[in-house]
Amino acid sequence: MNLEYQIKKPEGTLEGFVDFFWMLANPSSEEQEVVVLPDGRVDVFFSVSAAEPYGALLMGLSDEPQRSVIVAGSRTFAVSFNLLAVEYILDTPISLSSMQQLRDGFWGVTEKDLDDFDGFCTKVSAVLSRLLKPDVDDRKRQLFELIYSTNGTVAVKELSDKVFWSSRQINRYFNQWFGLSLKAYCNILRFRASFPHIKDGKLYPEQNYTDQAHFIKEVKKYAGVSPKELSRNKDERFIHITTLPRKR
């Protein structure tokens, strides 16, 4: 696959809210069909191509594979957010598999900004830092730190006990802001954490799955194929597996 891909991690106060900035370009004259796997992130995309006008899009969480086409000559710069940013930066609830077209000039980003990835990251970081609300709820901050540090493998009851917030209240918060339950989200994170192992051909569970059958069932649910087929990544169609950094 002739795609160009870069990522850049945030700095300072944005850590914990922004997972990373990224760019994806298809410099070839042919479109690329891909499958986008659920990864537990919320994304804001800024895209342009020879065939399509510049535009911005907010993409919510997904719990199933999404077929997509990367247009020939296209260029996309984006921000991948952790869930805490939905309330404290984006300030808008999302629903599962939601897609929202954003107004022209969103965050002050223009088509010209897509010529310089580092410049884009610097500009958008400044905007996000201004948008970031103060006084983040400590329970929520601690909850997400636990979820991400354990790749979603800790039981909901244990998470609830550690942050002193009832499971019922947590699930109400998750459904209100993110469109799914805490357990459903943790399952997506656990699936995401298996990407590097699957890419390396390790087709057995390493993320606290009950057994091999459970692992295969979960991979099929979120990828649409078995772990073995996912690891083969024929024609490099599974985009998250393709863009993993190569081992040195």
Image (spheres, rainbow, N blue to C red):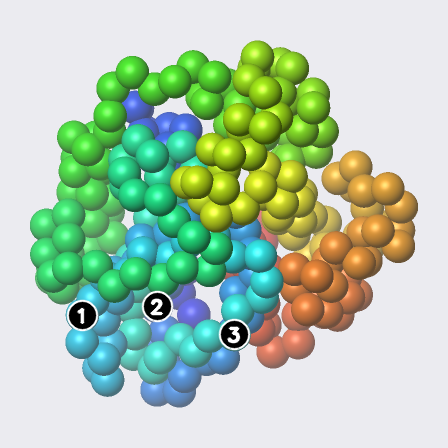
Tag 2 secondary structure: strand
On screen, residue 222 above or below 164: below
Q: Which residue is mark 2?
A: 25
Tag 3 secondary structure: strand
Q: Please state which amino acid type lies under the numbered disc 2.
A: Ala
Left or right: 206, with 99 as reference point: right
**Distance Cα–Cα, label 1 vs label 2:** 14 Å
Residue 170 showing in the rendered view: yes
Percent position (x, y) of residue 142?
50, 18
Residue 189 showing in the rendered view: no
Left or right: 33, with 55 as reference point: right
- Front one among 211 and 193: 211
Which circle's residue, 1 or 2, is located before the other in the chain?
Answer: 2
Q: Which residue is mark 1?
A: 54
Q: Nearer the viewer, mark 1 or mark 2?
A: 1
Q: Nearer the viewer, mark 2 or mark 3?
A: 3
Left or right: 160, with 11 as reference point: right
Q: Which residue is mark 3?
A: 67
On screen, residue 147 above or below 5: above
**Distance Cα–Cα, label 2 vs label 3:** 17 Å
Which residue is at 34% across, 19% downward?
A: 136
Percent position (x, y) of residue 61?
47, 52
Which circle's residue, 2 or 3, is located before the other in the chain?
Answer: 2
Q: Please state which amino acid type lies under the numbered disc 3.
A: Arg
Dots 1 and 2: beta carbons under 8 Å? no
Dots 2 and 3: beta carbons under 8 Å? no
Q: Which mark is residue 247?
A: none
Image quadrant where residue 126 sits: top left
Tag 1 secondary structure: loop
* Dot 1 alpha-carbon crowd within 10 angstroms: few under 14, some 14 to 19, many 20 or more: some
Percent position (x, y) of residue 106?
15, 53
Which residue is at 24% across, 29% downward?
A: 132
